[in-house]
Image (cartoon, rainbow, N blue to C red):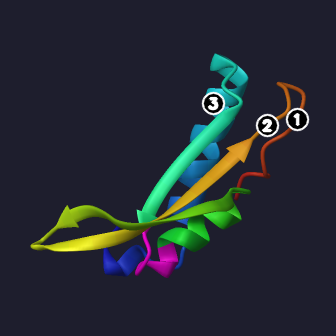
């Protein structure tokens, strides 16, 4: 996401639309996402999408010459009837 588009909710809306499509059209009820532990903006996107933090993965990936910790987020919809968080309009 470019600097000029930060803070507009575009990533959150994209995640919500993906969850909505996958749950309504494909019947998917379990969603998982990872982000760098040092990236609070990405963590906020997942939380705004209704995901809960499920884990902290220590030195899980090697990126740009160093090991990075990751945050693990998840969302479980109990069934197709359960709604996803409302979309931003």
Mark 3 nearby-residue class (10 Å; few <14, some 14–19, many ≥20) = some
Q: Which residues are magenta?
A: 36-41
Question: Given contact means CB atoms under 8 Å apart, are the residues at marks 2 and 3 in contact?
Answer: no
Q: Secondary structure at mark 2?
A: loop
Question: Given contact means CB atoms under 8 Å apart, are the residues at marks 2 and 1 in contact?
Answer: yes
The answer to whether residue 26 is left or right of residue 58 is right
Residue designated by label 1: 82
Q: Earlier in the sequence, mark 2 or mark 3?
A: 3
Q: Residue at x 64, y 50 (%)?
A: 74
Residue 43 at x, y = what percent?
A: 55, 70
Residue designated by label 3: 21
Q: CA distance from mark 2 to mark 1?
A: 6 Å
Q: Nearer the viewer, mark 1 or mark 3?
A: 1
Res 77 label: 2
The answer to whether residue 12 is left or right of residue 63 is right
Residue 48 at x, y = what percent?
A: 69, 65
Q: Residue at x 70, y 19 (%)?
A: 27
Residue 30 at x, y = what percent?
A: 66, 35
Q: Which of the 4 image quarters holds residue 59?
A: bottom left
Which of 85 and 29 lies nearest the eye of the viewer? 29
Residue 29 lies in magenta, yes or no?
no
Q: Is residue 12 above or below residue 39?
A: above
Q: CA distance from mark 1 to mark 3?
A: 13 Å
Q: Residue at x 66, y 19 (%)?
A: 25
Residue 40 lies in magenta, yes or no?
yes
Q: Which of the 4 image quarters holds residue 46?
A: bottom right
């Amino acid at each position: 996401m470019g600097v000029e588009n930060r803070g507009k909710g575009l990533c959150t809306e994209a995640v919500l639309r993906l969850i909505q499509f996958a749950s309504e059209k494909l019947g998917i009820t379990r969603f998982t996402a990872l982000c760098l532990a040092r990236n609070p903006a990405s963590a906020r996107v997942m939380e705004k999408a209704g995901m809960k933090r499920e884990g902290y993965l220590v030195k899980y990936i090697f990126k740009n010459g160093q090991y990075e910790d990751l945050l693990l987020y998840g969302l479980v919809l109990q069934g197709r009837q359960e709604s996803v968080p409302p979309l931003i309009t």
